[in-house]
């Protein structure tokens, strides 16, 4: 199982004390396995082997929305009745599956054994399995494990668990180091944009976790500074801290101002002058603001309601409020890390209800009562809400689309404007 | 342990969801962890249903496991009853809950809810979606209609004089392949025979209506995968006869009418003799001669695969070169049919095996599921979808049944559409060197954008750019036994791409049989003469 000791919610300076509604009931969210859908494309020589049930396999093809029918670099070892009879047999079966897989896919250099609800419940020890299999396949193939089970992880927490499993294995950085590490899977195009900006600022040793292939995973060590590109990386942050890396707390790079503040945090930490920072970022920031202007008229004053999904909800609400004048009513998040979210929460209006966890029927009652202009929710809820006349935005699209950075600020705003525009266009 | 990338069927509790979601006034309390709610989107997104499936998930977490997950189940069941006030409830476990053995059936019994509660035992580690749907439907039918069954041994009273015969339509579910339209088509067909529909179940059926199932004179088993078990029980309990033919295709529809005439005594001759479908004339029309002997590979659930193979051979004039199903429960029927077509049945739920079988059979058309559509797209072969598992495209806005006479019209249109048309096929053969006839250009009626993937909808273009797709089909790879001369290799390229694989293999096996070390131009044409088309 993943290490899930609660994170210290030490009061960051300036952190606003706001009440949080904690719900415990039916959750309309994906489990952590779903992160594999983007991770298997991000790390190009990795394979994700889920050890689970037919449900896991069915989830993976359903969550992909349509079937991505390229032979993907993920698969499910479906446990059958005989595997449940004895763990010895299950391990033996797993070894066979891995042998077949690696024989068929000699291009695979990194194999993740991914735990699921059933494998966790029967206590199939995938850490030991990974160790055992490493004995056979190292150094050609590295074999790691993490759990993406629904009993432990919600949606993007699967990526957190995956990246956290990589950290102990990362090469040791030379000390003293002046490396900057960007943590969290980003679209390749966004990575390239950020790399150019950091280089222009004078921060030359920038690397990304996860890297695009197993051999180029970044080094880390005492003094490595890291910025989170994604808000759901609680465990990965802790794992990096254990390696001596230092977190640079910042708002997340969503929107013109969000990106500005994120870059500025790194820039200040590396002692870069304000003038130089301005010189480098003025043009792209101005472009981003111009792109946002186009949507402000459509979005300003519109009310917003977030069902919990990816932990991106709070940064998104901050961006939509601060940069486009939207009015969040409720911001639901599957898990609230108050420390990582402190800079974001500080920028949300005081009367916004922040909720953590879910009791979906009760939350639907609140949503119906408030009738927001836009409801951000998962695919199971969106169409039924549209039928009731509510405008929705599928939250999963916010995870599968490049939305970070200056050049994507306008695209991000457009994702929220489009459902509203569509409603005004249709005359049927 | 079975390594799986794509699955034809979900777990059995998804089958139960298909029954619950099809019905009105039924609620399903599913003991399941967070994440299993993904299944809701199958119904709200793929089928575009307007309501959430009537399913409450208990959503237990790791930290609950040492404590009382049973109590969590009871709280969820009680809350669901209070909130949704269903007429009846089904309760069960998903794969993970099955392992923690909380016994939802026993727990709900102890709660003494004032409605019928039907417990489900759906073994997740040995059974699959269709079995789960069938079992759920059977348990509901038995649980609710059972109370109205006559004493065992009682003979069924004859239908009163002057009363119209009536039928139950059994099997249509949520997330079914064209079930919505098939129900309309069969209801119309029965109406024209003077037969009333008593109950349609489970689609749009209330639990209370199941109590009336015994009133009908007979049962129409629309989809044996879902309804056969329940119909067998109804036959035992109520002495109700049932139909055996699934009315997909003109011939099957006529056979279906004959069966019903025999069961009820109505006169079906006028309907059988009338030219109710356009398929027979369109198929006889001379422009359809190009369909003759088109090699077709058929794969799907057993019901649709069997019906499609029959219609393909006898109503379209195709040649069935492969037949298979993922419905293991019906393997025997499919084997028997395959035998009639002179092919070996493929019984598997491994899509890689299906892909290999398609490559080996070198068909010109694939009739399959969404899986085969993707395989065919990759191989550059035309494909029409005939069976679940479904995709959002399998819920067309227009009326589009598979069953009955209108269903036969739909089959004709959808199966012919992906094929290269008659004269175009000849032109392709005559002028291979025309730059627009290159292998990268698909059939002209699909537009030039559809290069090399004739049946590919444009909206999926972004998905087929991923690198793994760019692998050459194995049909292009010679096994190295005989070397091809440059001339012969060039000539082979002049053969249209959709039959080239077959030509290559025939030529190579001919060369091997005759002990030739080299394949020349002459060998190519000798082999052509030897094998014929």
Image (cartoon, coloured by chain):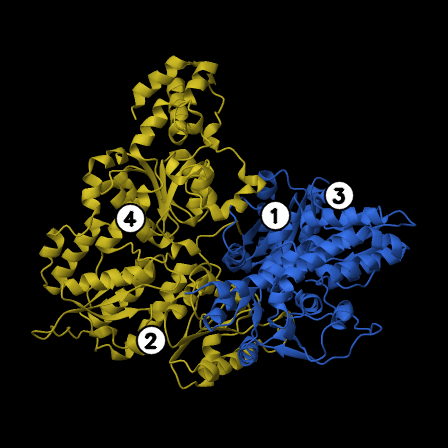
Q: Which residue is mark 1?
A: A95
Which residue in the protein does label 3 denote? Answer: A216
Marks 3 and 2: same chain? no
Crowd tier of the residue under label 2, counting other residues whose Cα lies within 10 Å: few below 14, some 14–19, many 20 or above: many
Residue B90 left/right relative to A351: left
In the rendering, which numbered label is found on residue A237? none
Q: Nearer the viewer, mark 4 or mark 2?
A: 4
Q: Quadrant of residue A163?
A: bottom right
Q: CA distance from mark 4 to mark 3?
A: 53 Å
Given this view, does label 1 or label 2 mark the residue nearer the observer?
Answer: 2
Colour displayed for chain A in the image of the structure: blue
Is residue B304 left or right of A108 when viewed as pictured? Answer: left
Chain containing the residue with disc 3:
A
Task: Tell me: residue B482, above or below residue B50.
Answer: above
CA neighbours of label 1 inside 10 A, class few (<14), some (14 to 19), many (20+):
some
Q: CA gap, disc 3 to disc 2?
A: 59 Å
Disc sitting over residue B411 in the figure: 4
Q: CA distance from mark 1 to mark 4?
A: 46 Å
Q: Residue furthest left?
A: B161
Are marks 4 and 3 in one subunit?
no
Which secondary structure lies at badge 4? helix
Instruction: Give a yes or no on whether discs 1 and 2 share a subunit.
Output: no
Query: Label for residue B206?
Result: 2
Chain coloured yellow in the rendered structure: B
Looking at this view, is B309 or A426 the one in front?
A426
């Amino acid at each position: 199982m993943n290490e899930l000791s609660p994170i210290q919610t030490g009061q960051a300076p300036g952190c606003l004390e706001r009440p949080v509604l904690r719900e415990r009931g039916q959750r309309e969210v994906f489990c952590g396995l779903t992160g594999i859908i983007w991770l298997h494309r991000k790390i190009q020589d990795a394979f994700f082997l889920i050890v689970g049930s037919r449900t896991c396999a069915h989830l993976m093809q359903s969550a992909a929305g349509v079937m991505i029918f390229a032979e993907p670099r993920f698969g499910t070892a479906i446990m059958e009745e005989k595997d449940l009879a004895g763990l010895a047999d299950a391990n033996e079966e797993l070894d066979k599956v891995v042998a077949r897989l690696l024989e068929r896919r000699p291009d695979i250099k990194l194999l993740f054994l991914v735990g699921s609800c059933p494998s966790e419940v029967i206590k199939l020890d995938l850490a030991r399995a990974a160790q055992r299999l490493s004995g056979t396949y190292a150094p050609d193939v590295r074999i790691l494990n993490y759990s993406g089970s629904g009993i432990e992880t919600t949606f993007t927490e699967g990526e957190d668990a995956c990246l956290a499993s990589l950290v102990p294995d990362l090469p040791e950085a030379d000390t003293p180091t002046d490396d900057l590490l960007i943590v969290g899977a980003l679209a390749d195009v966004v990575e390239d944009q950020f790399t150019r900006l950091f280089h222009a600022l004078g921060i030359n040793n920038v690397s990304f976790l996860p890297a695009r292939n197993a051999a180029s995973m970044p080094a880390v060590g005492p003094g490595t500074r890291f910025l989170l590109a994604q808000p759901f990386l609680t465990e990965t942050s802790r794992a990096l801290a254990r390696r001596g890396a230092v977190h640079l707390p910042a708002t997340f790079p969503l929107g013109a101002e969000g990106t500005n503040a994120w870059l500025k945090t790194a820039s200040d930490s590396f002692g870069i002058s304000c003038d130089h920072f301005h010189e480098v970022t003025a043009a792209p920031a101005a472009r981003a603001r111009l792109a946002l202007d186009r949507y402000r008229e459509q979005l300003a004053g519109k009310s917003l309601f977030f069902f919990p999904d990816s932990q991106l909800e709070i940064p998104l609400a901050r961006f939509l409020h601060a940069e486009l004048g939207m009015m969040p009513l409720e911001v639901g998040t599957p898990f609230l890390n108050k420390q990582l979210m402190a800079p974001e929460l500080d920028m949300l209006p005081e009367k916004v209800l922040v909720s953590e966890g879910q009791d979906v029927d009760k939350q639907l009652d609140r949503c119906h009562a408030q009738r927001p202009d836009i409801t951000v929710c998962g695919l199971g809820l969106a169409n039924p809400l549209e039928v009731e006349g509510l405008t929705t935005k599928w939250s999963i699209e916010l995870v599968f689309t490049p939305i970070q950075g200056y050049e994507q600020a306008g695209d991000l705003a457009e994702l929220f404007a489009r459902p509203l525009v569509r409603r005004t266009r249709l005359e049927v | 342990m079975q390594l799986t990338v794509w699955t034809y069927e979900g777990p059995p509790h998804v089958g139960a969801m298909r029954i619950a979601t099809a019905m009105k006034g039924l609620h399903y309390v599913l003991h399941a962890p967070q994440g299993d709610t993904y299944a809701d989107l199958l119904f709200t997104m793929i089928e575009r249903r307007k309501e959430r499936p009537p399913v409450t998930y208990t959503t237990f977490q790791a930290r609950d496991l040492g404590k009382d997950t049973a109590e969590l189940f009871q709280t969820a069941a009680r809350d669901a009853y209070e909130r949704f006030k269903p007429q009846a409830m089904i309760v069960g476990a998903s794969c993970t809950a099955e392992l923690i053995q909380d016994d939802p059936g026993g727990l709900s019994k102890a709660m003494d809810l004032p409605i019928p509660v039907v417990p489900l035992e759906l073994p997740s580690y040995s059974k699959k979606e269709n079995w789960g749907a069938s079992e759920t439907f059977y348990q509901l039918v038995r649980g609710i209609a059972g109370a109205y069954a006559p004493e065992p041994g009682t003979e069924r009273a004859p239908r009163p004089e002057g009363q119209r015969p009536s039928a139950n339509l059994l099997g249509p579910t949520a997330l079914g392949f064209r079930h919505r339209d098939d129900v309309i088509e069969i209801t119309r067909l029965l109406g024209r025979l003077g037969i009333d529909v008593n109950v349609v179940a489970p689609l749009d059926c209330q639990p209370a209506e199941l109590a009336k199932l015994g009133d009908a004179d007979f049962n129409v088993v629309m989809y044996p995968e879902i309804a056969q078990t329940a119909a067998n029980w109804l036959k035992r309990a109520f002495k109700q006869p049932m139909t055996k033919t699934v009315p997909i295709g003109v011939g099957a529809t006529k056979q279906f009418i004959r069966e019903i005439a025999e069961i009820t005594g109505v006169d079906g001759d006028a309907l059988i003799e009338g030219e109710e479908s356009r398929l027979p004339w369109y198929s006889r029309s001379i422009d359809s001669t190009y369909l003759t002997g088109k090699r077709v590979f058929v794969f799907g659930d057993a019901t649709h695969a069997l019906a499609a193979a029959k219609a393909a051979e006898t109503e379209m004039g195709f040649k069935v070169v492969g037949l298979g199903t993922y419905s293991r429960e019906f393997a025997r029927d499919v084997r028997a049919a395959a035998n009639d077509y002179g092919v070996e049945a493929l019984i598997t739920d491994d899509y890689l095996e299906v892909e290999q079988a398609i490559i080996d059979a070198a068909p010109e058309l694939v009739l399959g599921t969404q899986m085969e559509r993707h395989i065919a797209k990759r191989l550059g072969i035309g494909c029409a979808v005939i069976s679940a598992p479904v995709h959002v495209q399998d819920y067309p806005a227009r009326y589009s049944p598979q069953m009955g006479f209108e269903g036969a019209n739909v089959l004709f249109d959808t199966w012919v559409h992906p094929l290269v048309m008659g004269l175009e096929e000849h032109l392709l053969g005559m002028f291979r060197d025309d730059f627009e006839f290159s292998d990268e250009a698909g059939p002209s009626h699909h537009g030039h954008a559809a290069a090399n993937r004739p049946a590919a909808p444009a909206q999926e273009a972004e998905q087929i750019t991923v690198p793994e797709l760019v692998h050459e089909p194995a049909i292009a790879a010679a096994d190295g036994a005989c070397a091809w001369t440059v001339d012969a290799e060039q000539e082979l390229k002049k053969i249209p791409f959709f039959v080239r694989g077959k030509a290559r293999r025939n030529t190579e096996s001919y060369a091997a049989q005759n002990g030739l070390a080299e394949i020349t131009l002459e060998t190519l044409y000798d082999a052509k003469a030897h094998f014929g088309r």
